Image (cartoon, grey):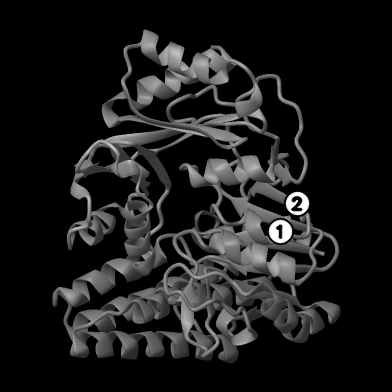
Amino acid sequence: MKVLKFGGASLQDGNSLKQIAEVISTTKGPKAIVLSAFNGVTDELNNLLSRILNKHFSEKQISTFVNKLKLEHLEFLKQATLECNDRVVAGIVTDDALHKVVGQCNRLERLLYGLRYIDEITERSRDLINSFGERLSVIIAAEALNHLGINCQPLEADKIGVVTDGLFGKSSAILPLVRKNMGRVVMPLIRRNIVPVITGYFGCDKYGRTTTFGRGGSDYSAAVIAYALDADALELWKDVDGFMSADPEIIPQARLIKHLSYKEAAELAYFGSTILHPRTVEPVLLKNIPIVIRNTFKPKGSGTVIHNYHIAHSVPVKGITYEKASGFIKVHGYGSGFGYRPEVVNEITGRLLANNINIKSILSAPTGIGLVFGKEDFDEAFSVLSRTPIKLVSGFEKVMDQALIAFVGEGMTREQGVAARVFTCLAKKRINIEMISAGASSAAGFFIIHRRDLKKTITTLYKEFFGG
């Protein structure tokens, strides 16, 4: 039993649907498919929401946008089934599929009208609107796959019981409930040799309200489905060969990493690699389900295998990754010992928790505290902390234009000399380090530099550990 997930980069047009069909048809045994939206659709929906809120979109423009979305998806289906005439109903789209596409687009249009009228977009409504890319992609993909000889059925995650904790924009699946529901709804289809094509990216809370898993959350969705179906493997099909030892745009000679432990993969994803959603390993780790990252357009490649054991590597560092837009906030205090006072850290973390803001890392000293955030949380975190005074805190300072660099390898921090090699080679290139963290994980360390030194830093580290 396998779960195969195809991301937006693999869903470009009708031709990519044919490539996906080839991958599915050559995958032996029972299987379930998890899909993202077609490439760029979720971004379009997000941009539309911003324009509606700023009153830059009329009702007519909303109708034009939704109609364009509908025709684009029907065109993808025409391409996949090698049909080129303008009549999208006759012989190309079944009445059922056409009804579903039109129904979803009509529903989306009504929701967008409503948001424009009330002039308010909540986290709940944003999650619901952003789910429509996946709702449309599973209808189109399942219809195309049926045309191409694969017996499929499209399913919406919030309709089949992918139950979450209800945190809009950043939800987590309630795994026991999802497992129970998948056994009731999805497994009977698989036993009848029907391939379920399931929406990624979102689920629903206990009241049935749509909640998303955050940017790139379809990887996590697929891992949840793999857990719930007791899959033997989770295959993530993307437009890259797998994890690389560094970003090939900076290091053209970067190598494919063929094996990673769960911990190594999670650290690479957490510290900037966009190949994998950082939380993907959580569900599969519970059942030791291996993850395989493969290239949809190079299906014979070996890819990267992520599993529960560590394979020795020729160098202590397996991969170098970065987050270009990272920033941090310095907390200044009255007196030299305020960093020791537990009430200060408690107040800071409490405020951030109340606003669902994630702290990427926290470092404290007697005279100051450093808080590292991802780009999506940075400005909001500063606003929340600066809103009202905190006892013993004299002020908050934004440190901008930074980049976070992480070096990753299982057991690396226990090996003598790794950190020394990192900081010595950077010192020789006169690269200043703003903040350092090592030891919190046995598989990773990170530091922060000015963004202008990013390329030079990556190049220097790569030469130090991989040569060339």
Residue 138 % position (x, y): 57, 74
| Contact check, label 1 and label 2, Cβ < 8 Å | yes
Q: x, y percentage for residue 215?
A: 44, 60
Q: Residue at x 62, y 35 (%)?
A: 442
**Which of 298/313 is in front?**
313
Residue nearest the viewer, comparing 88 with 410 = 410
The image position of residue 411, as x and y in percent, is: 67, 30
Residue 290: numbered disc: 2
Q: Residue at x 23, y 54 (%)?
A: 382
Q: Is residue 298 left or right of residue 204?
A: right
Q: Quadrant of residue 105?
A: bottom left
Disc 1 crowd, CA 10 A, few/some/many (<14, 14-19, 20+): many
Q: Is residue 85 left or right of residue 408?
A: left
- What label sits on residue 284 in the rendered view? 1
Q: Is residue 256 above or below residue 67?
A: above
The mark nearer the N terminus, 1 or 2, is 1
- Write down the quadrant of residue 267 in the picture: top right
**Distance (Cα) linking label 1 and label 2:** 7 Å
Residue 382 in sight in this render: yes
Above or below for 424 versus 173: above
**Residue drawn at the location 59% of the way across and 79% of the way down:** 157
Quadrant assignment for the C terminus: top right
